[in-house]
Image (spheres, grey):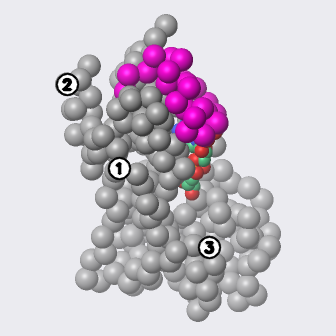
Amino acid sequence: MNRRILLLGGTTEALRPARRLGLETVYSLAGLGRVPAALPCHVRVGGFGGAEGLAAFIASEGIELLLDLTHPYAAQISHNAARAAEITGVPCWALRRPGWQPGADDDWREVDDWDALTRALVPFERPFFTSGREPLAHLHEIPEHQHWTVRCLQAEPAPLRAEVIGARGPFSLDEERALFARLRCDVLVSKNSGSASTEPKLQVARELGLPVLLLRRPELPVVAREFAESESLWEALQQRL
Ligand code: NAP
């Protein structure tokens, strides 16, 4: 059977079309997180083997449209998608969610990578990491004066002076207020995902006057059509179907 749409997903925004499109669509996941149950489309889990592998899949499945609804920090798959679109001549549409913008009361500091983040964290004692799994690889390096809390999709045992919370957004403002109060964190670490579902933590940091260390967004490729929010992408998709 020819599948007309290849939807690269793994985000909350990708789930909406994945729940509405039928078997003509392949919903593709890297396989790092939970695979959503009972989707009406075909679900495929795992990498393609780079841009060439993705292009080969597009050709063999008769894909006519590539949708990149991956996370803004999942830059590799977005570059692969743009390259595969060039190779195959199949258009690529992408959700390019704008990043969050600081307000007048915000103390946001952008850092380029893990090393820069570590240096920026030195003055603090209780960082709260909401930036994915990367801190888990560094739990043995926690400075003597710090206690780390890491929130990511899956909890795991933590050493002394650390707590790993397994949780999946969306997170409400009240939940975040209660969590910040329990943790007594003095700095928030985040990616600038721009997602409404994880934005309340920034409001709480603002209320408490906490600095926010943001990992810089990666550069993403330009593709045939780009949408700033999922609603306009969905409308364009319906017009095309
Ligand atoms: P990535 O670095 O862009 O991708 C690495 C490889 O994983 C790709 O080259 C591809 O393998 C495979 N892959 C990624 N997304 C795929 C998809 N939808 N379908 C099939 N294969 C896929 O992305 P990442 O490793 O997933 O994550 C990179 C960063 O983004 C991390 O910092 C992570 O925290 C963040 N992220 C966040 C969310 C979220 O919060 N919802 C989701 C995803 C990623 P092949 O080259 O073999 O095709």
Residue wearing tag 3: 114
Label 2 secondary element: helix
| Residue located at (35% from left, 50% from top) | 222
Residue 126's x, y, as percent? 61, 81
Q: Quick check: is the Cβ at mark 2 less than 8 Å away from ligand 1?
A: no
Residue 83, percent across and down? 47, 41
Which badge, 3 or 1, comes first in the chain's sequence?
Answer: 3
Crowdedness near tag 1: few (<14), some (14–19) or many (≥20) residues, C-alpha within 10 Å:
some
Residue at (62% x, 54% y) in the render:
166
User: Which residue matches tag 2?
Assistant: 239
Q: Which residue is mark 1?
A: 222
Labels 1 and 2 touching (C-beta < 8 A): no
Between 13 and 52, the residue placed more toward the observer is 52
Residues at marks 3 and 2, CA–CA distance in whole angstroms: 43 Å
Whether the magenta-drawn stretch holds residue 59 is answered as yes
What amino acid type should be assigned to the residue bearing mark 1? Val
Given residues 12 and 221, the one toward you in this image is 221
Return the residue nearer the eye: 8 or 140: 8
Name the residue: 27% across, 77% down.
Answer: 103
Q: Quadrant of residue 20?
A: top left
Task: Report the label total.
Answer: 3
* Extreme residue toward the bottom, this view: 123
Mark 3 is surrounded, within 10 Å at the Cα level, by few (under 14), some (14 to 19) or many (20 or more) other residues, namely few
Q: Which residues are magenta?
A: 37-65
Residue 24 picture location, percent across and down = 42, 15
Quadrant in the picture for the C terminus: top left
